[in-house]
């Protein structure tokens, strides 16, 4: 395959009128341009320019090759203009991946606002509970709730992730309100499970003292939003990321329990994107938008 750089050099020689002038235009030495022209002619197996002491004259083959070389020049110029346009104006496709609860509850309203602000951006939101391969799946930005380990990604923190104990008023009317961590051991608790592990030890702290309570319950669920719905139905007490129950706490569908105690926070929330020397303006603007909206305070 021909090296496009050789065609660019050939086009510059013809346009400038001499090898010396082309070297000046391209910012390199005359010998470099001469070698590039010789390499192109060797690759094609044909002379492109007849050289005399006074002028350069295109051969018939050279005239045809020049037309193609000029098309490459125009294409490179167009790409530069497109790149410049995209860097000056927020536009174009944007692929975003996000875990299901965060996507449904918190990211969708923000994307709606973002696309209203930037009407030439086209967002594809992938809501799924797995770690996407950003490179292979051509994802521009992923929202992750995790302790990040992948050094190939750039991470921008959006929010901390506090946790909270909650129950529905109907359950508390029936079973009573716990007033100490130890009381939780005598309540029906809704337990988070993942990969055959049940998270049934809840640590609650006050000052320097931490009480680890072994709780029990007949309902175990591996989906956060399903736990929220089950808690709202009055089935028991559960421990969840606050981001999942903010709406229910605000509406009164769920009540926070033992607020004077602190719970270990969940993993922080990050916007991540592949490490690149050049970052598309719509990607950079979207991440800045999420941070400027005080994403953490929304949850």
Image (cartoon, helix red, strand yellow):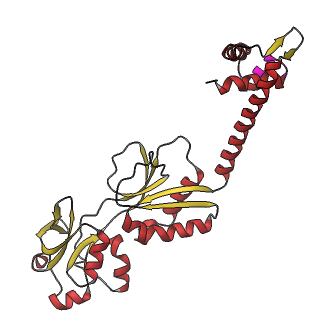
Residues 276 and 180: in front is: 276
Give the vertical position of 285 relative to 30 (above or below). below
**Residue shown at 20% from the left, 78% from the top:** 237
Residues 151 and 204: in front is: 151
Q: Is residue 130 magenta?
A: no
| Quadrant of the rendering where the N terminus is positioned | top right
Q: Is residue 166 left or right of residue 72?
A: left
* Highlighted range, magenta: 17-23
Residue 254 in the image: x percent, y percent?
Answer: 29, 83
Tally of numbered tags: 0
Which residue is farthest right?
A: 54
Most frequent secondary structure within the magenta stretch: helix
Q: Is residue 204 left or right of residue 19?
A: left
Q: Is residue 210 left or right of residue 80?
A: left
Give the vertical position of 269 relative to 259 (above or below). above
Q: Is residue 21 magenta?
A: yes
**Residue shown at 42% from the left, 70% from the top:** 104
Residue 52 in the image: x percent, y percent?
Answer: 86, 9
Residue 165 in the image: x percent, y percent?
Answer: 24, 75
Give the vertical position of 13 relative to 119 (above or below). above
């Amino acid at each position: 395959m021909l090296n496009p750089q050789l065609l660019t050099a050939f086009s510059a020689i013809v346009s400038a009128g001499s090898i010396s002038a082309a070297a000046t235009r391209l910012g390199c030495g005359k010998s470099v341009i001469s070698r590039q022209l010789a390499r192109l002619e060797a690759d094609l197996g044909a002379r492109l320019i007849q050289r005399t002491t006074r002028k350069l004259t295109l051969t018939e083959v050279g005239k045809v090759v020049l037309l193609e070389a000029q098309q490459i020049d125009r294409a490179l110029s167009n790409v530069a203009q497109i790149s410049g346009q995209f860097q000056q104006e927020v536009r174009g496709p944007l692929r975003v991946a996000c875990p299901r609860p965060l996507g449904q509850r918190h990211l969708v309203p923000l994307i709606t606002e973002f696309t209203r602000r930037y009407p030439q951006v086209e967002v594809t939101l992938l809501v799924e509970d797995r770690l996407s391969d950003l490179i292979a799946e051509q994802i521009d930005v992923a929202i992750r709730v995790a302790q990040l380990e992948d050094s190939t990604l750039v991470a921008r923190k959006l929010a901390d992730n506090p946790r909270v104990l909650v129950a529905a008023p109907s359950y508390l009317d029936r079973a009573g309100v716990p007033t100490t961590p130890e009381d939780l051991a005598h309540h029906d608790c809704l337990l988070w499970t993942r990969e055959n592990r049940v998270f049934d030890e809840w640590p609650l702290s006050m000052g320097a003292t931490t009480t680890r309570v072994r709780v029990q319950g007949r309902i175990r669920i591996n989906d956060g939003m399903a736990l929220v719905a089950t808690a709202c139905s009055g089935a028991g007490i559960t421990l969840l990321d606050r981001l999942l129950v903010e709406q229910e706490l605000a509406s009164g569908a769920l009540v926070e329990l033992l607020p004077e105690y602190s719970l270990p926070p969940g993993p922080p929330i990050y916007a991540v994107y592949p490490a690149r020397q050049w970052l598309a303006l719509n990607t950079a603007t979207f991440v800045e938008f999420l941070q400027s909206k005080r994403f953490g305070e929304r949850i």
